[in-house]
Amino acid sequence: MSLAVPRNRERGIIRSEPAENESRILPINAPLTAPARADLRSPSWAESVRDAVRDVAELERLLELPPRALDTLPAADFPLLVPRGFVARMRKHDPRDPLLLQVLPRPLEAEAVPGFTADPVREQGLADGGMIEKYPGRALLIASGACPIHCRYCFRRAFPYAEQLAARGGWDAAIDALRARPGLREAILSGGDPLSLSNRRLGELVAKIEATSIRTLRIHTRFPVVVPERVDAGLLDLLGSTRLDTVVVVHGNHPNELDDGVARALRTLRPRVGALLNQSVLLRGVNDSVETLALLSERLFECGVLPYYLHLLDAVAGAAHFDVGPDIGRKLVAQLRARLPGYLVPRLVRETPGELSKTLIG
Ligand code: SF4
């Protein structure tokens, strides 16, 4: 049976602001068009995204694999996108490399699996002006639909960004939604990846949040791990000067992602924020061994980052082949506890639709 991935491209939204860097970055589920490719005047991090690999044959060549060595699926709605700096961290000649498996569209994605849906955490349609209030006291802003990489297991791979983006209307609807809920204390910038926004656009958003009663700004981002040059002077200034308490949660799944360039970026970021945390997804064939998870925690700590969450896979259509399951997850975390100090053991969690917090598994 073949899987139907919803078509929900958001090109009109992202590209409606042509002066901005983020307008040139690939929305999470849309291919870059030729005009956008030709009109880039962007800093190096945006160039890294623009120049990302989008073609499996090129990936094979860079990894020194024979032509057609990689069994792939043409995935028009969520195409291959991987920056060259991330490819450089993959092992050559190895079609099972754990970084490669995170980005390679495989035929397994086309298998429909009961329980795996386009909206696994049932959040589509919940956004009020791009703001989702999932948990008490915290609001999540869908700040951008663009990403520096396409992770095949992403639970928002079919999210309808075109309709539910906080950037629409200059953030006003999202900020109004924040103001309308005075109990909120923390704004979480999510996406897509909120660091797809230029520093100027991000600064505008942060200034608007500062003018509310929000106290804490949390940014969920894969950029510092995937494109470490995103941690630039403008971003550091912005994070260092806001009145808001800041938390940055990066996303790395395997120790091989954290090379020296990433370590430098994270160590530079660390003193500018109140907390620097990591969340990972437990992925079959990628990081489902205690050795890998222990190395990841230790390497994160070397980079100034504390392991925060290890997520069980959200049941998103197309990603069932990554599923590890709670029993193995519990066993792995118990083994981690036996090896590592408590502060290096991430909390194993699952997101359950309708619950007021993530469910702690072990
Ligand atoms: S996991 Fe994050 S970076 Fe990866 S595709 Fe999803 S939103 Fe983008």
Image (spheres, rainbow, N blue to C red):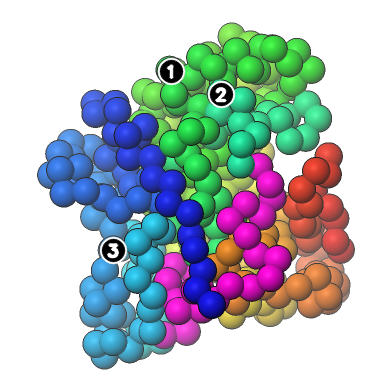
Residue, x 48% and y 60% (percent of image)?
5
Give the labeled residue for mark 3.
54
Q: Which residue is mark 2?
A: 129
Contact flag, marks 2 and 1 (Cβ < 8 Å) = yes
Residue at horizontal 45 percent and vertical 26 percent from the top: 167
Return the residue nearer the eye: 189 or 132: 132
Q: Which residue range is magenta in the image? A: 95-123
- CA separation in Å, label 1 and label 3: 31 Å
- Marks 2/1: CA–CA distance: 9 Å
Residue at image location 72% in from the left, 54% down from the top: 309
The CA span between labels 3 and 2 is: 32 Å
The tag earlier along the polypeptide, 3 or 2, is 3
In this view, 238 is above or below 36: above
Q: Earlier in the sequence, mark 2 or mark 1?
A: 2
Disc 2, SS = loop
Farthest residue to the front: give it.
1
Q: Is residue 22 visible?
A: no
Q: Residue 169 — which label?
A: 1
**The N terminus appears in which quarter of the rendering?**
bottom right
Q: Secondary structure at mark 3?
A: loop
